[in-house]
Amino acid sequence: MLSYASKRVSVGIVTLLAASIIVFAVLEIVPGDPARLMLGMNATEDAVRTLQEQMGFNQPLISRYFSWLGGLLTGDFGKSYTYSVPVFDLIKERVAVSLPLALISLALSTVIAIPVGLFSASRRGSIADTAAMGAAQIGIAIPNFWFALLLVYVFAVMLRLLPAGGFTGWENGLWPSIKSLILPSIALALPQASILARVTRSSLLDVLGEDYIRTARAKGLSRRRVLYHHALRNALIPVLTILGMQFSFLLAGTIIVENVFYLPGLGRLVFQAITQRDLIVVEGVVILLVATVIIVNLVVDLAYAIVDPRLWSRR
Amino acid sequence: MNIWKSFLIGTAIALLPATTSFAAKTDLVLGIVLEPPHLDPTAGAAAAIDEIVYANIFEGLTRIGPKGDVLPALSESWILSDDGKVYTFKLHKDVKFHDGTGFDAEDVKFSLDRARGDKSTNAQKGLFAAIDTVETVDSLTVKVTLKQPSGDFLYNMAWGDAVIVAPESADTNKDKPIGTGPFKLENWEKGSQIVIAKNPDYWGTPAKLEKATFRIIPDPAAATAALLAGDVQAFPVFPSYETIAQFQTDPRFKVVIGTTEGETVLGMNNKKPPFDNVNVRQAIAHAIDRKTVIDGAMFGFGAPIGSFFPPHHPAYFDLTAETTYDPELAKKLLAEAGHPNGFKTTLKLPPPTYARRGGEIIAAELREIGIDAEIIPVEWAQWLDQVFKNKDYDMTIVSHTEPNDLNIFARDDYYFNYDSATFKELIKQIEATSDGPKRTELYQQAQKLLAADEPAAFLFQLPKTGIWDAKIEGLWENGPIQANDLTAVKWID
Amino acid sequence: MSTRADLRNVLTNRSFLIGAIITLIIAIMAGLSFMWTPYNVSALDVVAKLKPPSMTHWLGTDHFGRDILSMIMVGSRASILVAFVSVAIGAGIGIPLGLWAAASGGVVDEILMRFNDLVFAFPALLSAVMITAIFGPGAINAIIAIGIFNIPVFARVARGAALSLWVREFVLAARAIGKDEGRITIDHILPNMANVLIIQGTIQFSLGILAEAGLSYVGLGSQPPMPSWGRMLFEAQTMISLAPHMALFPGLAIMMTVLGLNLLGDGLRDLLDPKLRYMR
């Protein structure tokens, strides 16, 4: 187990390093000069040159990569070109929006999906099952930004119950902040819930077909009792895997939905930073997201290995 | 069932917007579209910086008033020498920066020398080009000597880029702006809002508002919703032209359509064939129906222009009749230029709505006369790089929002690649002439020359679409510069 | 299984039937758009802007007075083209890589899998945004951005399916008579995994439609005057209080296309590979 774990961790670290090189190299070839963008149309050439020097663009690429990497390791993500504040602080502020958003939609999708999946599995083949799974098919097919637009139309434009966008900040009260996260979380949660409901249903059906369940039924336990006490626990393993994958997806997948609702989250930050050529911010956010994906996958892998020892003994 | 019902009612009440109190309010939330990158107007071109700090946080020797006139600011008066080269500024006394340090002639000398120095990253270094020396006479008197007389000098010193900063805080103004104005920065939540509060130690007429919040709302739909819900009480430049009509019929709001300095043009690369041929440029101008562009892209807001000059300026001369919409004439001109079947070209469009939507309409209109313009959307960074700096473009649409910028057509190396000795001579004369009928005459000659040469197709003047609560007074109706001067803003009952 | 039984299966598989019908309708609509649309989508008529659905314009008009039904018909081309080519790229590169890894095993396999991990570690949409930001927005770059992320998907599926086939008796038999690995891959492995690949292709196709819509929505997909569903939604956003029909119909078009493809994929899975029925 230990050697399997250490192998997975070292693979994760190598992947992360490779990713950092890719991110840095790719962003270096982005056309457009941040210094000129900051100074605008009337700027003189020598003002632009002076600013480029102040921003450290005249140093060689390799040394800039290593000083960036070294900074990352010590928690120093560099200083934003446009805002001239530490990138880390910017990310911290934005995570305070994106993380709750991702968590709320994750919770929402779980709360909706697992009961629906259970219900469908327990009434397999019934009209209710067909209807629920049909709804899930539609949920998967709906683009989340379109769903977001429809929500805005109904709840913000027609009913005027919830804000159409923007975020007032946590320090201006919990309720207004949560209010502005309601519609975005629903928009994000719907497709996730649909996938999750399908996975829950099918993995339950798989488990229900296993021998030990049949034995339990043969021993006279009620169908309901078997479903909740024996099948559900075992069926949850694949469900948890999907949940783990969804979390990193949600964190990154908020980009478009954050754009619909103009929420100052990570997605908007990186989107804005790309257009403003604030490359150091883009690099920081991307590497952070990549690291999250790698770590979540690692944790899921290791959790799997603990549950299912065959995985690591085989290798 | 009852519990469910009372829960619903409770939620509905909680969701209702809070009712306003009856006492006259002293705080205001304004919506702005773009977040400034930082708050130092002397180190960046972004108009969003001036929209927060101009006249509110930072002040210059002079300032621009609501009608575009030059008014005294930190300098209470000035004297111009007879040869027109030496300005002697008399400064206000007892002025303090927000950090408590005193303001005097040394700060003026420091600011002007810093802006024009070698290490300067001032985006408008050209404003200071006329300055030869800056000397302090005494602690409240500054003498500025020019290389040659300049009719625009006092105007130039009123720009946001020419505000006076203190040596102690100059390097940290981006994040912690320290000026002399009636407001100080209280708090900046990046990506969300900027809050300024009344400066109790202000030297001049104190502000009437205690607090003003600039909330950043880039999305037009969200802007509409925020105004309707009362989350934002004023949108000095409302971004959603399509929803203005619904505010015009709502008595709670005042809708003020003013003018700006933004001449919106279809820029053409005058050195690149086929745009080096004046007939081609004229053909393009005649192929464009300004009314359709304004109706389609701007929902009817914006005044058509026939040359590069703002209609509200006293020296404006209406030349829109020179390039009326006439596709037949356009085709004839194209044929004369040797392109009877049109040609293929490109149209690079920066992000603003006026450019993206206007570009789609213009491309469709150009197709009618056989010109196939491929639309290439670019971000500002790419636009500045490709179009502005490297002149790697055929056509583009952009609004020139700087005030007093007729002279860009006289610049060598400007992205139009327009080169006219006659025009340059006119600009030289204008710059050496102070206000009066002579200057007006020269301005009009320059406008006519541009309308004839058509280095760019002139489309419309960008409107200032202000919407605010009907109980607010003192916001600017027009935008002679991009600023939200809050010094006189107040709530009335 | 006899052909008759196959046919009966096809006709009783609800997912497959509904999916096939929807997909066919979309395909016919896209094909028809090359020959006929109710209105010309490149002609603007600003006077008739933002008209709600009516007898003259069944789905209403947009902010430039263009007919939305015609726009949706022509817009289907961009969606289908981008999704199809990006699947082709992913399959064209990913499948050979996966087969190679399965056939050689060892270091090649390890490197390929680590490469897969690397690509999967990048949030797909964010990376697509970066790619189009670098190379500029447009259909071709959208295809590349989406296609890159299809490569590891196909590589992984092909590798997994091939590995399970390599231990089967008929493959071992082929090996026993002296066929080399390349030959076996082409003669025995590839034909026997076609089902799995077709199913995955359908799924990636529908994901491609969604991705193209997302990229166009943020302005990075195909460019005007060529209409696209995602961009129509972007334009609709600011007009939502004036003309909600502008937001409704393009979204429905995206949803129906994706739904049709997903149902088709599910149905195909049931028909072609009953073992995989509950996997997604």
Image (spheres, rainbow, N blue to C red):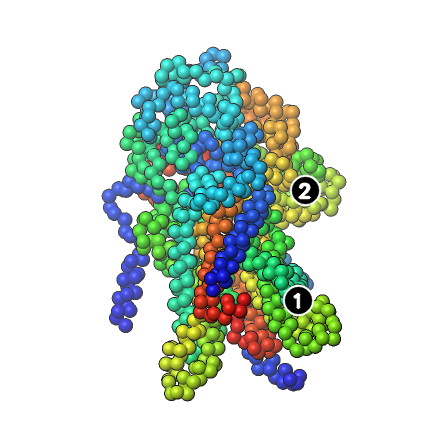
Camera-side residue of B5 and A234: A234
Residue drawn at 59 percent across, 65 percent down: C156
Q: Secondary structure at mark 1?
A: helix
- Residue at the disc numbered 2: B330
Q: Residues within 10 Å of mark 1 (few under 14, many from 20)?
A: many
Residue drawn at 28 percent across, 68 percent down: B5
A132 vs B420, left or right, is: left
- Residue at the disc numbered 1: C103
Residue drawn at 40 percent across, 59 percent down: A103
Where is B34 relative to A314, above or below? above
Measured as percent of width and height from the top left, residue B457 is found at: 61, 38
Q: Secondary structure at mark 2?
A: helix
Q: Amino acid at mark 1?
A: Ala
In space, the residues marked 1 and 2 are separated at their CA atoms by 66 Å
Q: Amino acid at mark 2?
A: Ala
C40 vs A296, left or right, is: right
Residue A308 seen in render:
yes
On the image, which quarter does residue B187 sit in?
Answer: top left
Q: Quadrant of the C terminus of chain B?
A: top left
Measured as percent of width and height from the top left, residue B452 is found at: 64, 32
Where is C145 relative to C25, above or below? above
Camera-side residue of B381 and C35: B381
Q: Chain of mark 2?
A: B
